[in-house]
Image (cartoon, coloured by chain):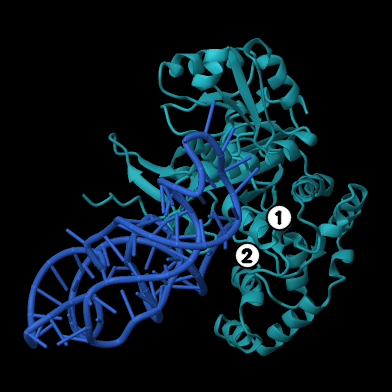
RNA sequence: GCGAGGGUAGUUCAGUGGCAGAACGCGCGCCUGUGGAGCGCGAUGUCGCGGGUUCGAAUCCCGUCCCUCGCCCCA
């Protein structure tokens, strides 16, 4: 019988993959809670209308998993968290004590073609600060991201957070006569600038409705890497980032705009410096979102980071952690001739003292049992075979040093305690 | 939705008309109760699936399914 195919774009988490996911979850929890953020989560299923509100046409119409439930309502597997967050905030309304610092790590789905760093089912870290409209709040979020990077060993020469501001960009564009209907086209154009050859980019601009003057103005605007200094908002942002000690990770980049429609102010994206430059994390300020889902207007700022690209970046930089899969502290060997009950008893005794203990679940040659312990990186093995049982003794082998000692069975627990304490 | 490359052992892949292979992994032995390193031996396959051409097909042709990469979009 052939193996039934998994659903396209889903991922299997074998123990080694699960170990990484759990490690990442722990790192994210650590960085988030260092800044006082509280963990929350939304449902995995939402009504489609929730996303229709503001997520952007592409994400809703092309990339959501949508299906009717038994009552005929159109349901989406959540493609992002921010609309659920906005809904949750709007529902509680004035019952909430602002500001809110909330974070989450969970699964999301997008119906798109699988490729490197992109699957249809992925995990995402979301973190938001709701109820504050200052650039200092934006800077804090960036600092949380930088803290995670630092904690896992991603330095500023491996990864950068590129920052821009939509209000600043709109003001700059207005000066060179780009406004109204040309604005979304320009945002799309800016977004593609680093992915296209200069000539192709120019033809694309002219085809999109730019005239030569506007294009020349745009090129000139992009060359001005000090433009942020004309924006009080950006000045505050960068000053705060410096005070938070994370400015080494930050660059002003006038081409960063972000695709989602709900961003209003500061926007940013983290990218790896040498690799494929795929976006690792993206976010910014959204001051109208809560009102869009029907609540009173509350400002917010936050970002999302996917697990897949993050893992790839760690790997490419040679800093993906080598994680142990087995939780076991001690393996108890098992031999025939009535030895099984002795093994099980010893396992229970050591487990009762608070250690993680497994017994080899069937009689087998010692060679095989030691190999099993070796492959699973189990640090201690208790050998209890016919020789030991007859003499009322046990042997304890340290798998790291290779040293082994035989002693009275009543000494076993203290010896294990001593070994595992070191 | 568009474009490119693939599918052969558990894994990564070589084989482009004539006996289905290598490396790693796995098993066994050297070592009768001692893992990792070394050496030796060994097992493992619907060559994605269906059809066609041929004396003969993993190899050529047609169809089909699946995977990967890129574009689009985005975490």
Q: CA distance from mark 2 to mark 1?
A: 18 Å
Examine the rendering and report whether any part of residue A83 can be seen: no
Q: Quarter of the image holding residue A279? A: bottom right
Question: Which chain is depicted cyan?
Answer: A
- In the figure, is residue A152 to the left or right of A346? right
Residue at 67%, 64% in the rendered image: A257
Query: What SS does tag 1 mark?
Result: loop
| Closest to the observer, B36 or B7 | B36
User: Mark 2–mark 1 contact, CB under 8 Å?
Assistant: no
Indicate whether A422 appears above or below A413: below
Residue A260 rendering spot, x and y as whole percentages: 59, 57
Q: Which mark is residue A319?
A: 1
Q: Chain of mark 2?
A: A
Q: Which mark is residue A361?
A: none
Residue at 48%, 44% in the rendered image: A13
Q: Quarter of the image holding residue A207? A: bottom right
Identify the residue position indicated by label 2 in the image: A278
Determine if marks 2 and 1 fall on one subunit. Answer: yes
Question: Which chain is depicted blue?
Answer: B
Would you call the spot at circle 1 few (<14 residues within 10 Å), some (14-19), or many (20 or more)?
A: few
């Amino acid at each position: 019988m052939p193996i039934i195919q998994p659903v396209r774009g889903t991922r299997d988490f074998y123990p080694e993959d699960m170990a990484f996911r759990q490690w990442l979850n722990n790192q994210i929890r650590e960085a988030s809670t260092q800044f006082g953020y509280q963990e929350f989560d939304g449902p995995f299923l939402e009504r489609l209308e929730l996303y229709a509100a503001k997520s952007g046409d592409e994400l809703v119409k092309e990339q959501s998993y949508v299906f009717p439930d038994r009552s005929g309502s159109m349901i989406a597997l959540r493609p992002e968290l921010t609309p659920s967050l906005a809904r949750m905030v709007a529902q509680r309304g004035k019952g909430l004590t602002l500001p809110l610092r909330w974070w989450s790590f969970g699964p999301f789905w997008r119906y798109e073609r699988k490729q490197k760093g992109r699957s249809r089912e992925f995990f995402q870290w979301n973190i938001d600060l709701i109820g504050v409209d200052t650039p200092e709040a934006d800077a804090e979020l960036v600092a949380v991201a930088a803290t995670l990077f630092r904690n896992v060993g991603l330095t500023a020469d491996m990864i950068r957070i590129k920052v821009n501001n939509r209000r600043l960009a709109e003001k700059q564009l207005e000066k060179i006569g780009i406004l109204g209907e040309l604005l979304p086209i320009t945002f799309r154009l800016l977004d593609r600038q680093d992915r296209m050859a200069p000539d192709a980019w120019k033809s694309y601009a002219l085809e999109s409705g730019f005239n030569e003057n506007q294009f020349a103005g745009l090129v000139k605007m992009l060359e001005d890497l000090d433009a942020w200094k004309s924006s009080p908002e950006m000045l505050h942002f960068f000053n705060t980032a410096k005070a938070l000690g994370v400015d080494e990770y930050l660059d002003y980049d006038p081409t960063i705009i972000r695709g989602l429609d709900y961003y209003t102010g500061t926007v940013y994206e983290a990218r790896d410096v040498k690799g494929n430059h795929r976006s690792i994390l993206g976010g910014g300020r959204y001051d109208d979102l809560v009102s869009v889902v029907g609540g009173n207007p509350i400002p917010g700022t936050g970002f999302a980071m996917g697990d897949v690209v993050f893992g790839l970046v760690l790997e490419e930089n040679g800093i993906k952690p080598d994680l142990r899969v087995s939780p076991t502290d001690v393996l108890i060997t098992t031999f025939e001739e009535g030895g099984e009950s002795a093994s099980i008893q010893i396992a229970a005794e050591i487990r009762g003292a608070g250690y993680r203990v497994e017994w080899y679940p069937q009689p087998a040659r010692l060679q095989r049992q030691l190999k099993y312990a070796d492959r699973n990186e189990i640090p201690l093995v208790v050998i209890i075979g016919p020789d030991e049982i007859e003499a009322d003794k046990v042997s304890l082998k340290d798998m790291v040093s290779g040293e082994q000692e035989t002693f009275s069975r009543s000494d076993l627990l203290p010896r294990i305690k001593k070994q595992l304490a070191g």
